[in-house]
Amino acid sequence: MAQKQTNKAKKEAPKPVKKVAVQKAAPKKVSVDVPAVSEKELLLQSLRGMRDILPDEQPYWERVRRSLSNAAQEYGFQRIDVPTVEYLHLFVRSIKEGTDIIDKEIYSFETRGGDRVALRPEFSAGVARAYIQHGMSVLPKPIRLFSMGPVFRYDRPQEGRYRELWQGNFEIFGEDDPILDAQVLQLAYRVVQELGLKNIEFQVNSIGSTESRKRYEKALVRFLESQKQKLCQNCRERLSTNPMRTLDCKEDKCAQLTATAPQAIDFLDDESRAHFKSLLEYLDELEIPYSINTRLVRGLDYYTRTVFEIWSSDREGKKYALGGGGRYDGLIRELGGESTPAIGFGLGLDRIVLEMKRNQVRPYEAAKPRVFIAQLGDLAKKKSLRLFSDLEKHGILAAESFGRGSLKAQLRVANRLGSEVTVILGQKEALDGTAIVKDMVSGTQETVTREKLVDAVKKILKSNVALAHPKKS
Ligand code: HAM
């Protein structure tokens, strides 16, 4: 069954598109194949590499989401949501052919209207497109934008690697001062620290300006060409498409060879060198645990100068990239906007959640309702909905068990939840327009009118807080 699914998933996978031909075709009539009976079960199976994040797991995700949103706010980022689907061309133009993302991993397809589109494999290209499209360059700089959501990569699924993955993404436009680079790393560090992650290391490098990068690539190709036969087949191809990607090839023989290859850092132009030096000074000042990785080049092609990655390692020494980013001073221009420096980073939220679990970090705990509403009889049942909304409008969270008939069963639920107050609505109270308010701590109860109910509940809750936190005299 599993094998069958794999084959089907393979069959269904859109072929990576190499040449981008944006053609308008006549709208097509699409016929939907009804699966054969034997394949029916597949309908009840999420796609390979894509998963449900079930309610049990949500408290971890909630903690991550809250932490990212708070950090974004504290560092002056505004939220931006960009579409999940964009023109394929946008990603090819930004991330570039010769990268795994464009050559192997992008989900692209033709719409019924004949447009070549793709599921976003990351956020930066879409955010940069939005920046240009909405004329944000006239806004006071720097402009800081934050996004969060799923992105899609047709990667080989395994633990921590999915085809639908979640990213938190931060971008800053309009400033090339290295202090911004340091601030971005400071923000990333703050997030992972606040989430209780241990054994985190930042790796930084500078790949220089577009020009110095070109000079470096030439030198690298010259070095590798002379020993081409020692490289794996992929890297041999990379020599002509994207030579810098050979530096992070996982094959031993390639790693051995590239270990002695020229380093980007030795080809930096004076400005990039000074920029990098300042960044390192800021990082020292901030006491961020970083190391310089001269082989760090990143898997997307738009970067210039600063690049960095955030790594964690488990007890067995296995390493995971939790996030990465860098400067991309040429991208806005490349996409047709006016020349605008930019820097940003993305965090892989699925991996952060895995890391939180590994580190036994406490997930988010929602405030528990302190009040329980119990009802008996049809009329009381109807009125109890109104009562629930009266309390909720005053900020009092109430639990209920509306579906349960017997009062005893409902009170059992109230006890299990540890409710401090139970509001009981029987047939008589429903007719009178009253309710019984029972203090579950002292066991006392009183009957109050609907108008006085909220005050009566508040009074008990307040006295419980006072009991729990007595004022020092
Ligand atoms: P990236 O390094 O490609 O950068 O992705 C950022 C993070 O997403 C990775 O460090 C990793 O944690 C997570 N990630 C990537 N692929 C997968 C996968 N298949 N499954 C689970 N997690 C994954 C970018 O995407 C850039 N757009 C970041 C950026 C923003 N640079 C500048 N601004």
Image: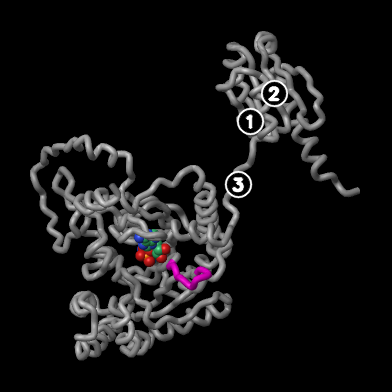
Amino acid identity at mark 2: Val
Q: Secondary structure at mark 3?
A: loop
Depth check, front residue: 327 or 259: 259
Q: Mark 1 and mark 3 in contact (Cβ < 8 Å)?
A: no
Q: Which mark is residue 423?
A: 2
When the figure is inspected, residue 466 is found, relative to residue 267, above or below; the finding is above
Q: Amino acid at mark 3?
A: Glu
Residue at 58% in and 79% down:
285
- What residue is drawn where x is 67% and y is 29%? 414
From the top left corner, tell me how far across and down residue 62 is, in percent: 52, 49
**Label 3 vs label 2: CA separation?**
25 Å
Dominant secondary structure of the residues highlighted in magenta in the image: loop
Name the N-terminal-most of marks 3 and 1: 3
Neighbours of disc 3 within 10 Å: few (<14), some (14-19), many (20+):
few
Q: What count of labels does the image hold?
A: 3
Work out whether residue 138 can be spotted: no
Q: Nearer the viewer, residue 390 or 136?
A: 390
The residue singled out by tag 3 in the image is: 365
Mark 2 or mark 1, earlier in chain: 1
Residue carrying label 1 = 398
* Residue 369 placement (x, y as % from top left): 64, 35
Residue 329 covered by magenta stretch: no
Q: Find the distance from the CA under tag 3 to the CA under tag 1.
A: 16 Å
Mark earlier in primary sequence (3, 2): 3
Kind of residue sitting beneath label 1: Ala
Quadrant in the picture for residue 426: top right
Range shown magenta: 314-321
Q: Are marks 2 and 1 in contact (CB under 8 Å)?
A: yes
Could you classify mark 1 by the number of other residues whose Cα lies within 10 Å: few (under 14), some (14-19), or many (20 or more)?
Answer: many
Q: Say if the magenta span includes residue 320.
A: yes
SS type, badge 2: strand
